Each structure stands twice: as structure tokens, then as C-alpha cells.
Amino acid sequence: MIFSKQLVNWYLQNKRDLPWRKTQDPYLIWLSEIMLQQTRVAQGLPYYESFVNAFPTVFDLANASEEQVLKLWQGLGYYSRARNLHHTARFIANELDGKFPGDYKSLLALKGVGDYTAAAIASFAFGEKVPVVDGNVFRVLSRVFGVETDISNASAKKEFQELALQLMTQDSKADFSQVNWGPAIFNQAIMEFGALQCAPKNPNCEVCVFNTNCVALKNGMVANLPLKTKKTKVTNRFLNYLIFEDQHHYTRIQKRSEKGIWYNLYEFPLIETESDANLEELIALVAKQYSNSIEITAIESLQLLPIRHKLSHQNLSIQFWKVSTNGVLPDGMPFSEVVKMPFPIVIYNFIERFKTEI
């Protein structure tokens, strides 16, 4: 079996038409790779297009404010990616004259660029012979070649990189009439194969081009590979957001300044509890925290049941409470201004749904 040739042939017949595959511009490739970290292509594509329209060059992104970047990123999740993206754009624009480093090792020095992203940029933009290794690649190689190494082990990535590099170079002199053979086409092909054909659950092995050679299929191990034993610890949190409303129908928001989820995004004043709070408990907590500074006239829940919102390592239970007040909030804002700020998507969705009621 010449793995690389079969893989590329499959890719040429099945690949999706994606804009970042039509360029060797490292800025556009970098933008797409950062956005697609832990994000499906269908979800990331509209954001990519919006960013390219708003910031067609690295200088445009560098000159934007962080709030502009976070607002455009709103809903994509893992917001540290957006902050690192902005930081790196400024570094490249101001320190490197807008020119991206041209090799894998130099790319690794950029903030927010890890092994996978550096390999993708180096191979796609500069043709460097360096393999990408992500979840798709782990899955394809472990199944086809029967690799039972636990991918949660630190040493696993190097093992898979070495295997991918061997496969990348085994047929490097092949004559593919439709493409120029190289590291870029191999990397794109193996990622696409993992995304479309060798899916995490219930792949259609009957039509797989490797079904006569796949070790996992022969041994009934498709569902068990890749092997991963280490599980992420998940914590439960209970968040109560207070939608203050004064006599002018102004409210108040705050910027999250502590490192953690949603850093530098905006939110309504927050009271965190150890379980879902009922109205009586919430009234007591609000009175304790705000009665000396704000005259509260009424508190009511703005939904029947808490909103359940799952993050990679946290399960959030979120409730929104309307808090009516007398007088004028000293730091109040009209909702027409509030909606312009970058919020976590769960809060933004609430604002969009209830803005006529609050």
C-alpha cells in the first residue's frame, strides 16, 4: 500500500471547496488555522469570511482594537485564540514589517502558534516538509496502522509526527497530474480524510479507500482508536446575572478582568452560587451585596429554567434576573450601547432574545 498516493487521490476527488486552500498567503492561512482550532469548518467559515472582510491584511488586524476583534469573534468560543491572534498581528505588523516567519521553528515563537499551527503555515505557505498532527491525524494514523499509543501521553505527538513524516516522503517523486505534489497537499489530504471519511464515530468503512489494509478495521478496533485514557476534569458552576434597570431603562455591565473563561469580555453583574438559586435566595444575596449603594424595588426571574451551557472543562448553569431600581445608576448604559460590546455568546443570545422585555 502506498498510503500517500491513495490518500491524495481520495482528496482530489472529495475535498471541500474552502477559501484558505486557494492561497499561499501566510496571513490568511494563519487566520484560518487559528479559527479552526477546536472548531468545525461549518462554524468557522462565516467567521473567517467576516475577519477577511474586516481585516484584509495583518496591518488591518493589528490596527483594530481588542474590543473590535472580540466582538467579531463573538460566538466562536475559546476567546484566548482571538486575544492571541490580535497580539500576534501587532507583533508581525510592528516588529516584522508585516512579514510572517518563513519556517516552522520561527513560527513556533509566535504567541498562540503551537506545533500544529506552525506546521500548517510552514507547509501550506512555504512548502516546508513538516507534518501536521491534530485530532484528525491521530485518528487516521492510529486506525490505518493500528497504533495503540495513548495519545494523551506527552510522547505520542512525536511518534505520530515521525510516522506522518515517513508517509509524507515515501512517495514524494510521484507524478500527480492534477496537483504539484508536496507537503501541503499531503497535510491537507490527511486532515480532510479524518474530517470527512475517518470520522470519530461510526465511520463508513465500507467505502474507505484503506478498508483492505486498515489494521483497526481488520481487528474490530475502529471504535477504540485512537486510544485516549486521560479525561478532562469538568466542574459545575452556577452563575446568576443581574440585569439592573433604572428609571431611564439603563443597565450596567462589567468587563471580566480575571484570567479564566471569557477574559476581557463583558457581562452583567454576577453572583455565583453553589447550586441553582431560587428567587428568595437571590433576593437575600442581592440585598446583601447592593442595598447600601442601590435602592432596589423589585427582582424577578427572566426565564423559567436555568440555561445549561457546556464548555470544554466547565458545565455552566446560568440564570438571568431583572433587578428594578429607583433613581439613576451612576454607571448605567442604554441597551443600544450595551449590544455593541463583546459578550460571551450565551449572554449575547439572552440580550437578543429579551432586549424588548428588559
Image (cartoon, rainbow, N blue to C red):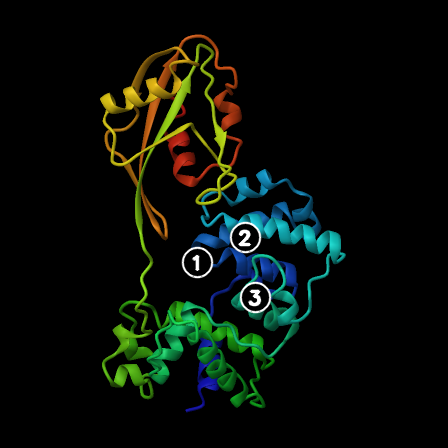
Q: Secondary structure at mark 2?
A: helix
> Neighbour class for label 2 at 10 Å: few (<14), some, many (≥20)?
many
N-terminal of the pair, mark 3 or mark 1, is: 3
Q: Nearer the viewer, residue 296 or 332?
A: 296
Check the image and report above or below for 52 versus 126. above
Which residue corresponds to mark 2?
A: 48
Q: Which mark is residue 38?
A: 1
Q: Are marks 1 and 2 in contact (CB under 8 Å)?
A: no
Q: Residue at x 46, y 71 (%)?
A: 191
C-alpha separation, residue under disc 1 versus residue under disc 2: 14 Å
- Percent position of residue 353, x then y: 37, 30
Q: Secondary structure at mark 1?
A: loop
Q: Secondary structure at mark 3?
A: helix
- Percent position of residue 113, x then y: 57, 61
N-terminal of the pair, mark 3 or mark 2, is: 3
Type of residue at label 1? Gln
Type of residue at label 2? Tyr
Q: Residue at x 31, y 18 (%)?
A: 299
> Neighbour class for label 1 at 10 Å: few (<14), some, many (≥20)?
some
C-alpha separation, residue under disc 3 versus residue under disc 2: 13 Å
Q: Which mark is residue 21?
A: 3
